Amino acid sequence: MRTQRRRFRPGRLAASLIAILVAAAWAFPVYWMLNSSLLPNTVLTSTTPRFWPWGGSLDNFAAVFAEGSFWPALGMSVAITLTTVVFCLLFAFLAALAISRFRFRGRASFVLAVLFIQMLPAEGLFIAQYKLMSSLSLLNTVTGVSILYVAAVVPFTIWMLRGFVAGVPIELEEAAMVDGLSRTQAFFRITFPLLAPGLVASGVYAFLQAWNEFTVALVILQKEEYRTLPLWLRGFVQASASRATDWGQVMAASTLVAVPVIIFFMIVQGRLTSGLVAGAVKG
């Protein structure tokens, strides 16, 4: 057999170089945040930028932890995010299963309602949401914010999961039922494992929406002891009249906010990749 030599393709080389440049441009802000978190504020406010953290230290991180409110804000964000992800996946999965597997009266109207809800601007609901949570005595609570987050994230999550559920042939369940399994056993043994990548992809979306959300939390969580991490981070940017903003501490605090997201992505990245590919092909 002849060994085929790889031909030099200028187009492929140019595409690779463009991809590298785009990746570098995307990663540079993250690197700049990490670099700035290790430098003192005097260096960051100088006219000459420093692209390497030579002479840097962890003093900015120590100052952030010494401020004392990071851990309560972290606990608040974790509680709200986990609650949102769990209930969002539960409701969205059941709804996606219903509209994909069953034919019932009002099915089309339900699908259109889900699509219509996505078109509503979030800012137009703030007053109604505040009055509702106030009447239910749910202001400054994990429950109140989680309810609003679930209501905001569920519609799009239903659309995501609907494609995954519709991509699994119902004949697989019917074949398992012929072999003696009940409908419930066939679903959990055959169909549910195939939907795991879709659940992971939808869970990542719900996680990011709840973790990074700012405006609803600003309206509902008015007490400092109930702040989430985005609200806590705002406190470092808003300098008082007597002192300037310490950008080193701001970058250190931003890094701490991003660390849980990075850890979460490292855990689910395998499932997330397969889930996104499956969702793009099926549906």
Image: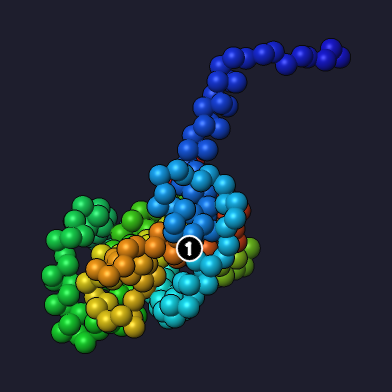
Q: Where residue 172 sits: x, y (%)?
A: 56, 55
In the image, 181: left or right of 94? right
* Residue 192 seen in the current view: no
Q: Where residue 18 sits: x, y (%)?
A: 51, 27
Q: Where residue 53 sits: x, y (%)?
A: 57, 52
Seen in the picture, residue 280 relative to 45 is either above or below; the reply is above
Residue shown at the point (77%, 14%) measured from the top left: 5
Q: Nearer the viewer, residue 34 or 109?
A: 34
* Residue 137 seen in the current view: yes
Displayed quadrant of residue 10: top right
In the image, 246: left or right of 277? left
Mark 1 packing: few (<14 Cα in 10 Å), some, or many (20+)? many
> In the rendered image, which quarter contains the N terminus?
top right
Residue shown at the point (49%, 34%) measured from the top left: 22
| Amino acid found under the numbered disc labelled 1 | Ala
For this orientation, the residue located farthest to the right is: 1
Displayed quadrant of residue 75: bottom left
Secondary element type, mark 1 = helix
Q: Nearer the viewer, residue 179 or 185?
A: 185
Dot 1 corresponds to which residue? 252
Residue shown at the point (40%, 44%) measured from the top left: 47
In the image, 268: left or right of 81? right
Q: Nearer the viewer, residue 42 or 78?
A: 42
